[in-house]
């Protein structure tokens, strides 16, 4: 792995947490290079040396690795303009908390698409939908983003979830946008150039291949 570029993002093509970092970098128009690894394969020694938890994403800054997506986002927001967190400490803390909720919903989405049996699929689906309803209650009444007109780091955190839910809606008989405010928010996020450019050009193909390899109830029955 070369450190010729100042910023290198180490990622899996299908990883939502790595996509968060890519969205932030795109939004801030910061030049970076992406190093894609293949999940499930033995990872190279250089990756093991920079990722103590063995997970992506890792952002390598002038040779210094920063790991964990939330930490990477905080670093990028401190170093590069425009700042995407609100300046008010309480508002910032509140949005950090909701970013954790996004991570929880990623887990539910993963459980849903990889569940082998109908019961596991339906439980995860129900919990994911209930989580989205809780998020809807926290959204600003002003459109279109979490806070209203201003795109924030909390939007960055949720955007990869809606990218995946949108693909699931297109491919299967599913509907996650049952709340009108969630629907508006999702559409606004999917329309952002920073979100569209944060994944590989054939991401739909990559994601569907991931689903097929998971061999879950979803791909086999819906």
Image (cartoon, rainbow, N blue to C red):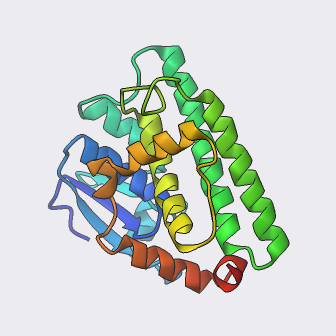
Is 104 placed left or right of 11 in the picture?
A: right
Above or below 151: residue 68:
below
* Rendering coords of residue 94 (x, y %): 57, 24
The vertical placement of 23 against 218, above or below, is above
x then y, percent, for residue 46:
37, 71
Q: Is residue 58 left or right of residue 135?
A: left
Front-lying residue, 148 or 77: 148
**Residue 107 visible from this viewpoint:** yes
Q: Is residue 164 above or below residue 26?
A: below
* Spot occupied by residue 115 in the image (x, y as percentages of width and height): 73, 73
In the image, is 192 to the left or to the right of 44? left
Q: Nearer the viewer, residue 103 or 220?
A: 220
Q: Quadrant of the C terminus?
A: bottom right
Name the residue rendered at 52%, 44% in the picture.
183
Q: Is residue 13 above or below residue 215?
A: above
- Residue 9 lies in quadrant: bottom left
Q: Residue at x 63, y 81 (%)?
A: 219
- Residue under the point 42% across and 77% down: 206
How many numbered markers are drawn?
Answer: 0
Q: Position of residue 97 (x, y in %)?
A: 60, 32
């Amino acid at each position: 792995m070369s450190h010729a570029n100042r910023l290198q993002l180490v990622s899996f093509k299908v990883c939502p947490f790595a996509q968060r970092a890519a969205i932030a970098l795109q939004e801030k128009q910061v030049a970076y290079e992406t190093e894609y690894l293949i999940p499930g394969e033995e990872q190279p020694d250089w990756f093991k040396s920079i990722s103590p938890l063995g997970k992506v994403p890792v952002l390598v800054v002038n040779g210094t690795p920063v790991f964990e997506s939330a930490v990477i986002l905080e670093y990028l927001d401190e170093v590069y303009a425009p700042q995407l967190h609100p300046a008010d400490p309480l508002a910032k803390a509140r949005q950090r908390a909701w970013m954790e909720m996004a991570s929880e919903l990623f887990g539910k989405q993963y459980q849903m698409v990889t569940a082998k049996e109908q019961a596991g699929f339906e439980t995860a689906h129900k919990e994911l939908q209930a989580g989205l309803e809780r998020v809807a209650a926290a959204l600003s009444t002003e459109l279109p983003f979490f806070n209203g007109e201003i795109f924030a780091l909390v939007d960055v955190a949720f955007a990869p979830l809606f990218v995946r839910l949108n693909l699931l809606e297109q491919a299967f008989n599913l509907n996650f946008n049952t709340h009108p405010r969630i629907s508006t928010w999702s559409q606004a996020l999917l329309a952002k150039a920073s979100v569209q450019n944060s994944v590989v050009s054939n991401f739909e193909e990559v994601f569907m291949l991931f689903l097929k390899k998971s061999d879950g109830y979803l791909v086999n029955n819906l």
